[in-house]
Image: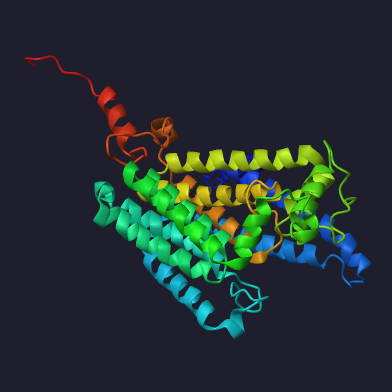
Amino acid sequence: MAIQERIRRISFPRVDYVLLSIVAALLIIGLIMIWSITFAPNVGEGSPDPQIDFVKQAGFALVGLVLVFVLMLVDYTVWGRLALPLMVGTVIVLILLLLMPSVSSVNGARRWLFEGSIQPSEVAKFTVIVYMAKWLSSKGDKLRQVTYGLLPFAIFVGGITGLIVLQPNLSTAIIIALCAMAMFFIAGADVIQYFFLLIAGGITIALVIKNTPYMFTRFMIYTQDPFASAATGSYQVAETLIALGSGGLVGRGLGTGYAKFGYVPAPYTDSIFALLGEELGLVGTWTVIALFLALCYRGFRISARANSSFGQILGAGLTFWLIFQAFANIAVVTATIPFTGVPLPFISFGGSSLVAALGAVGVLLSISRAEAEPTKEANATLDLGRRNGGPRLPSPGRHRASMETVARPVRPRGR
């Protein structure tokens, strides 16, 4: 009886365990695929430790999981108070990357620190989202004014993404810009100003691509038949599509794929979704897509039920980040968009991207712990179609006020 009583007294942290389960499933799939893709090639190359890549990724995953549970227990409002110093530190690091090419350069790109072990742009995704959430939640109706909303937003986002484009890393810059713009919209930006921002952003991206030779080459390859021009530049795209399609419905089988033996470049990083399709088939790819869609739903559910505007915008921004990056990777592998290097969250090999993505999950779980009471916020949703000039977010106190009004008895006149 004493043991049963102690078990009853155990109280687990109140978090979104469904989201935690979804992320755990994606993480397990990623570790399995990395082992499957790297083990046999490492053996063939005579590596003394053929499981080295799997062990590294498992270590990154362990660090990331510890970070998840730490951040889950930290009050998410702390990030609002740290938004400015975090953003200043991020800008300083991004500038130093450009000023110290001999220290930060890897294969001509200046994206990493400590010989490729840390990628500051992954941290920049988090800090930009935190800063934007704090800034947007503090503006209120002023956000619809050009001088308080559109102009400072464009200057800030343009400056940060410009530093990242110079690394060069256009794909990360676009993801950060898309996240910031999505947050700007749901926070209540004027629709006309927002469309102006979309047009200006599109023109800027087009000019960057046109004036950057390797980006322009990738875009031109994208406009061609990848199989007809495989010998002249689209080899990677063609081999990725072959690997993805050769798995059929259920795949060749785990560990039995061919593409990992030098056919597909970067098979366990940017192209891992194609290798997953080869070995696990359509069933495997659909499972991963379904998990990301479920993550999208849970993330926005947490955001809509948050107990403050800062929590709502922050939760939405973190969800946008993970989903935009996931489907950008899948779109690249399926040749839906021009080829670019974007890791698949929780699945691709890489310490910085994995730990950063798990850190985002930790903050989402922290927001879920502090959400408004379910009975009062059960119907809260992100209002993407609001036309009254206010934020496209549920008011944290709206449902509470309405329920108090219903519960208050009406007194007859004259008493």
Looking at this rendering, what residue extends furthest in the left direction?
414
Figure quadrant of residue 104: bottom right
Residue sitting at x 47%, y 50%: 317
Q: Is residue 324 visible?
A: yes
In the rendered view, tell whether residue 202 sits above or below residue 377.
below
Viewport quadrant of the N terminus: top right
Task: From the top left corner, tell me how far across and down residue 211 is, in percent.
Answer: 53, 66
Figure quadrant of residue 188: top left
In the rendered view, tell whether residue 205 sits above or below residue 164.
above
Figure quadrant of residue 218: bottom right
In this rendering, position of residue 173 left or right of residue 106: left
In this rendering, position of residue 122 left or right of residue 304: right
Residue sitting at x 45%, y 55%: 203
In this rendering, position of residue 47 left or right of residue 190: right
Viewport quadrant of the C terminus: top left
Residue sitting at x 75%, y 50%: 226
In the rendered view, tell whether residue 94 sits above or below residue 103.
above
Q: Is residue 342 visible?
A: no
Q: Nearer the viewer, residue 48 or 183?
A: 183
